[in-house]
Image: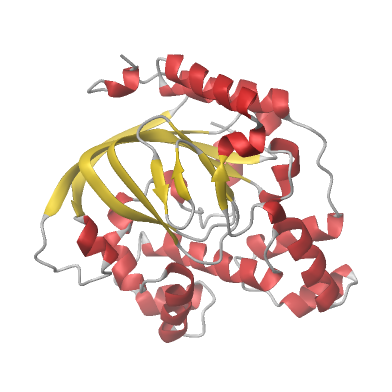
Amino acid sequence: MSWLDRDAIPSAAGASMKTHSGTKPDPETRASRGSPSSSRAVAQVSFETAEAIPAPRLRPFVARYGAYRARAADLGTGRGFPSRYVTVMVGLGTPFQVEGAGSFTSFVAGLHERTVAVESTGIVAGIHLFIDPLATRAVLGCPASELANGVVSLADVIGPRIDAELHERLHEARTWNECFAVLDDVLQRKLVDGALPREVGFAWARITAEQGRGRIEALATRIGWSRRHLTECFRHEVGITPKTLARIARFEHACSLLRYRLGDLAGVAVTAGYHEQAHMTHEWQALADCTPKAWIAQELPFLQDYEFIDPDPDADSRRDSR
């Protein structure tokens, strides 16, 4: 029996461990995007999570690992929201059912412009890798543009041999820390040279550092390109435009702010760079298929710390020092 099937997950020094439980609306309630005051039944869900920073050699490419396990008869349909990272989900439990893509034990999701529904049942366990889209050539062997707005099997990207080794060793591991060590080893052995145009890297860094509040026209001028040329080169490399990245960055920033300022939607909207609260709501409907209020009620209680972009610009240096 795998240690993942036991009632408790052993911890070890080095990984930040958290355990909590809560209630989650049944699948029909979540799918309807209905009122949080709905009288539909809810399911008791127990969450166990761990997070870690990859080995130093991997940190320019992989931002962090987030491990999780949840027990429930049916977790219903969750939502994968637009993110600045290419997502790798290494599954160690029951398969994921991804809207419009199929069933996967493990998968890679490129940058998305809209939310994607993911359904899980039974014991859901695995590790979430947050990969810099500018580093997918180095880590996964392909540009992020080949993955954009799509979901594919992890084995199809990294190859069946490496995929089989990874899953076998992860199932043999006894703690989350051992799982993280397996990922460090496999990914470091797979690293290849993945150089890309420095102008695209500079544009990505500026847009994300400014949380999407800067002007794309001014950024293109600073680089010495036309806006059209920047947009074409950017999309060729990562699969989305600079404007779309700016929208995603603002959305993520607002998500992080709402963790602490639940009742201040108007203030969060302005701080995150929206013209007003109505503008933020319109953007959330387009990107996340829900309003900020619905997100707070239906999603926020079940999101883990590692899923948020830290609004503190010194966060990365703090993590590296741990």
Give the quadrant of residue 269.
bottom left
Q: Is 84 located above or below residue 285 in the figure?
A: above
Total marks placed: 0
The spot of residue 13 in percent (x, y) is 43, 20
Closest to the observer: 76 or 197? 76
The spot of residue 304 in percent (x, y) is 38, 46
Which residue of the protein is positioned furthest toward the right in this rendering?
224
The spot of residue 179 in percent (x, y) is 48, 22
Closest to the observer: 64 or 95? 95
The spot of residue 195 in percent (x, y) is 84, 44
Is 156 on the left-hand or right-hand side of 70?
Answer: right
Q: Which residue is drawn at the image coordinates 81% and 41% (left, top)?
A: 194
Q: Is 71 located above or below residue 27 in the figure?
A: above
Closest to the observer: 156 or 130? 156
Q: Is 250 located above or below residue 118 in the figure?
A: below
Is 44 on the left-hand or right-hand side of 60?
Answer: left
Q: Which residue is drawn at the image coordinates 69% and 61% (left, top)?
A: 239
Is 187 on the left-hand or right-hand side of 177?
Answer: right
In the picture, the quarter occupied by the N terminus is top left
Q: Which residue is drawn at the image coordinates 49% and 53% (left, top)?
A: 101
Q: From this viewpoint, is residue 315 visible?
A: no
Is 305 on the left-hand or right-hand side of 35?
Answer: right
Q: Which residue is drawn at the image coordinates 47% and 75% (left, top)?
A: 286
- Which color scheme is applied? secondary structure
Q: From this viewpoint, is residue 234 visible?
A: yes
